[in-house]
Amino acid sequence: MNAAPADQIRLLDLQAIDSKLDQLAHRRRSLPEHAEIDKATADHTALKDLVVAAQAQQSDTARELTKAEQDVEQVRTRSARNQQRLDSGAITSPKDLENLQHEIGSLAKRQGDLEEVVLDVMERLETAQNRVDELTARLEHSTVVLTEAEARRDAAFAEIDAEAEKVRRDRETVAAVLPADLLKLYTKLREQQGGVGAARLYQRRCEGCRTEFSITELNAIKAEPADKVVRCENCSRILVRTAESGV
């Protein structure tokens, strides 16, 4: 393939622009905010699960307290009813009076035991509520952390994207004046060679693969016409000769 020496040199400009775009893309992918967001998202999700579990525990304990209080109220009501019967004097049978007094005593003990249960459940409910409050506060904080990290990422994206857009416009300007076949070859090699399709020959060295050429190899390159598109025999990239190439 042949191409004017000026067009070959323009490939170096295009390569520099493409390398800059690659750097910007890498910078966009490698923002520290990505790791922050991943961690904040994982923390947020874990805390949401903990809050749901704590709320379920609180709800279960609240129902348990309601049941315990109902049990106390039932015993208290029955005890009051028995006491009214006892105080009314309607029961005259000694045996019935003894049984009634015994039941009142048993109910008093039962009421005391149930009230202890109520107190225990109330303590556990308070603990459950405190746990919900603590986790909810942590969840709200994690939301702030995540939102702030996303905002920093989006701001960085905007800055990088604006710079990339300017560089892409510069690329369009350079690419527009290159011969189609030269641009096609450069694009193909760039895809094959890790983003570098054209490299300068400088001080006996290919700046693409850093191979240093022998005198014989340099003389062979020097013998090629100026418009000949030379390829590096080691990496196959387009080898661009400039005034500093020494050939």
Image (cartoon, rainbow, N blue to C red):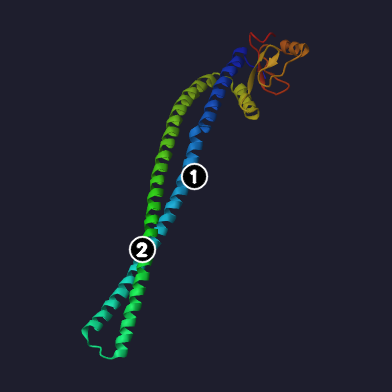
Q: Residue at x 47, y 26 (%)?
A: 165
Above or below 79: residue 94 = below
Query: Between marks 2 and 1, how big is the CA–CA gap?
Result: 38 Å
- Residue 100, image x and y in percent? 31, 84
Q: Amino acid at mark 2?
A: Leu
Answer with left or right where residue 58 lies relative to residue 246.
Answer: left
Tags 2 and 1 touching, CB below 8 Å: no
Camera-nearest residue between 72 and 32? 72
- Residue 38, image x and y in percent? 50, 40
Answer with left or right where residue 83 lies relative to residue 119.
Answer: left
Camera-nearest residue between 212 and 190? 212
Q: How many marks?
A: 2
| Mark 1 neighbour class, 10 Å CA radius: few under 14, some 14 to 19, many 20 or more | some
What is the quadrant of residue 113 in the picture?
Answer: bottom left
What secondary structure is found at the residue carrying circle 1? helix
Q: Residue at x 73, y 22 (%)?
A: 234
Camera-nearest residue between 72 and 242? 72
Disc 2: which residue: 119
| Mark 2 neighbour class, 10 Å CA radius: few under 14, some 14 to 19, many 20 or more | some
- Residue 152, image x and y in percent? 43, 32
What secondary structure is found at the residue carrying circle 2? helix
Camera-nearest residue between 222 and 61? 61
